[in-house]
Image (tube, rainbow, N blue to C red):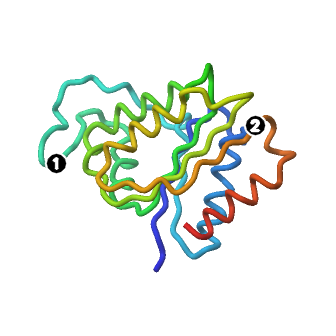
Amino acid sequence: MAKKVVVISSSPRKGGNSDTLCDEFVRGAVDGGNKAVKYFLEDIEFDSCKACMSCKTPERECYQDDQISLILDDMMEADVIVYATPVYYYSMTGTLKRFFDRCYPIFNHLENKDYYIITAVGSSNGNALTGIRDFISFSVNPTEKAVFTVVGDVSTQDDIKSEVYRAGRHC
C-alpha cells in the first residue's frame, strides 16, 4: 500500500547538502510507489507563532493566513515525515525551529508516524538531534526509522545519497 510522505527541508540553499538528500528521499519514495511532497521552507513566507492560543480549538487552525496550514494538513495525513536541516552552531536551523513552533496546533495530534531525520554538518550534529527528537516525542506513538548525516559536501558522497534513496524507496 502506498504511503504518503512529507519532507520538510529547512536548508537556506536549494540544492544544498541537506536539501539534496531530501530530493534523494523523495525520489526513492516516488520510485517505491509512494506519494511524496517536499516543502522547502525558505520558499514559504510565514511568521513566527504568536502564542495567542487561538489554534487550541477543535479545528486546530492558526489565524495566520499563510501556507503553513497546508503543510500541517499534509503532516496530519502523512504516514512518513522527514525533517532535514543543516547544523549551524550545533543546532537545527532557526527556520526549522520557527516551523516547529508553528506546528503547535497539531504537534500532539500526529499519531503513528514514521520519522526520518537528515542533517548536514561540518563536523558534528551537536544538539540538533536533541531538539528534533524532542519535537517528535510530542507525537503519539512515533517511530524514528533512521538518521542520516552527511559531513561535508554531499555531491561527492554517493554512498549517503544511495542510502537515503533506499530509505525513501522502502519507507
Nearer to us in this view, 40 or 2: 2
Q: In the rendered structure, which amino acid carries the disc numbered 2?
A: Val
Q: Which mark is residue 26?
A: none
- Residue in the picture at 45% in, 29% down: 97
Nearer to us in this view, 58 or 107: 107
Q: In the rendered structure, which amino acid carries the disc numbered 1?
A: Glu
| Residue ID for mark 1 | 59
> Which image quadrant is residue 125 in?
top right
- Residue in the picture at 40% in, 35% down: 100
Describe the element under mark 2 as helix, strand or loop.
strand
Find residue 126 and report its horizontal and vertical position in percent: 60, 27
Find residue 140 and report its horizontal and vertical position in percent: 29, 53
Nearer to us in this view, 70 or 128: 128
| Residue ID for mark 2 | 151
- Residue in the picture at 34% in, 60% down: 112
Q: Is residue 145 above or below residue 39?
A: below
